[in-house]
Amino acid sequence: MTIRCEIVSQDRIVYQDDVDMVVLPGTAGEMGILPHHSPVLTTLKYGVIHVKRQGEELFFTVAGGIAEVQPDQVTVLADAAENVEEINIQRAEEARRRAEQLLKEGAEKNPDIYLQVQAALRRSNLRISAVKRYRRG
Amino acid sequence: MPSTREMRLRIRSVKNLAQVTRALETVSASRVRKAIQANNATMPYAEKAWKVLIHLARQPGRDVLHPLLRQRDRVDRILVIMVSSDRGLAGAYNMNITRHTLSEFDRAGVPVDYVTVGRKGRELLVRKKKNVVAAFVDLPSPPSFNDVAAIGQLVVDDYLKDVYDQVFITYTHFRNMIKQEPVTQKLLPLTVVDKEHAKPGDLSATHRTSSVFTYEPDQNEVLENVVPHFTAIQIYKAILSAQASEHAARMVAMRNATESANELVQSLQLEYNKLRQSIITNEMLDIAGGANALQNDERGVG
């Protein structure tokens, strides 16, 4: 018994396959989705999606978005999503340093830039912690 | 009969023209590649977002779910977003989408307002004395979602304020390099269209179940997030598709122009050669005639 899992971000299909279980980082808490789950529409927070398939486990970072759950299908429409194995850790650390630097230099004076910098910081933090915690080997 | 000088000038100007159109063709070719890429990249997200909207529209009690899902009993005013291009020289691209749009909405029976994307569409509609309430020009190619978010905001706001009871978008759908067709999509209110021939794996396949969603964290927050955003995504998708069509149409138009300019050069060259030859022949005849006359004169004298 499997459930179809599709993860798309605004610029590509990140993952699609028939899987055994999906764990979503919902705004109201983690949700484990098994086949025949009742229909749910949920917003997602910054976090990690776990996908279990034939004994192995895959991890995807997701920077917010929404997920639609149907009995035979999970569709994740992410603002941005990546396979943890594909994350470039150097780039993420660089982005974090840059964002912290900008914050120190007083980016908060301009609200637009401040929001952008903060989002960048959150994204890179998410990437770095996901890699540390979930990357194999 | 034009002089050889005039003909030479004409040939040169047609050759220059062919050079310009060939350059434009090359530019369009690279633009169309980029536009297709952007279009393909966004397609899965847009189609899945549309699917979620359809599922929501099929929920029992949809009327109370979100104002954008509610069907209105009376339609007093319609808004149409027409996507065209900023620049011309794209064959019949802008004419086709305008003609398609007008044939769809000229007989609507209620007042229709237009929002145009692209300078040419605005010009064409204004010339036909249509009511254009907003015009968006000079979008980057390809645009980012933020570039077109304002359009979505505008139509959603006006719809919610009851200015309009229905919102449509007309754009040129990009099928492939040769085939682009004008289409109309209804944006608001969201209407369920069942796809009969949905194959498994088809991105636009929808579930037929109408079992009730649960919402997390709560219904209002989720729908406030989802419905307007996904409506804007549909506009974004339409604009990407239209831009790919525009560049493809321009490329084909420019290729045709280059070809006919080259043909024209050939036939002009042929005419020029004939003209030049006949002038030379005439001169030869003159000289020969003169020489003959001279000889005869000498013999007569001698």
Image (cartoon, coloured by chain):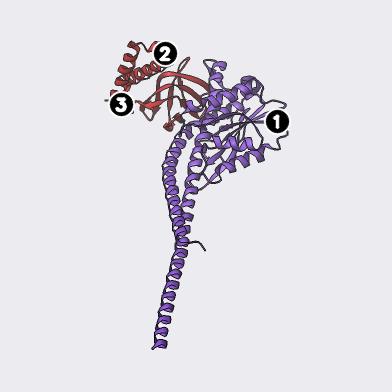
Chain colours: A red, B purple
Residue that mark 2 sits on: A110
Q: Position of residue A18 (x, y in %)?
A: 44, 32
Q: Position of residue B228 (x, y in %)?
A: 56, 23
Q: Between residues A17 and A91, which one lies in front from this camera angle? A: A91
Q: Position of residue B180 (x, y in %)?
A: 53, 44
**Residue A105's disc number:** none
The earlier-in-sequence mark between 2 and 3 is 3
Mark 3 belongs to which amino acid? Asn
Give the spatial CA distance, label 2 vs label 3: 29 Å
Q: Residue at x 56, y 19 (%)?
A: B224
Are there few (<14), some (14-19), or many (20+) residues within 10 Å of tag 1? Answer: some
Of all chains, the one bearing label 2 is A
Q: Residue at x 45, y 64 (%)?
A: B270
**Residue B111's disc number:** 1
Q: Position of residue A61 (x, y in %)?
A: 38, 23
Regarding mark 2 in the picture, which secondary structure is present there?
loop
Whether the residues at callouts 1 and 2 have beta carbons within 8 Å, the answer is no
Regarding mark 3 in the picture, which secondary structure is present there?
loop
Mark 2 belongs to which amino acid? Asn
Mark 1 belongs to which amino acid? Pro
| Same chain, labels 1 and 2 | no
Of all chains, the one bearing label 3 is A
Residue B68 visible at all: yes
Give the spatial CA distance, label 1 vs label 2: 44 Å
Give the spatial CA distance, label 1 vs label 3: 55 Å
Are there few (<14), some (14-19), or many (20+) residues within 10 Å of tag 3? Answer: few
Residue that mark 3 sits on: A88
| Occupied quadrant, residue B277 | bottom left
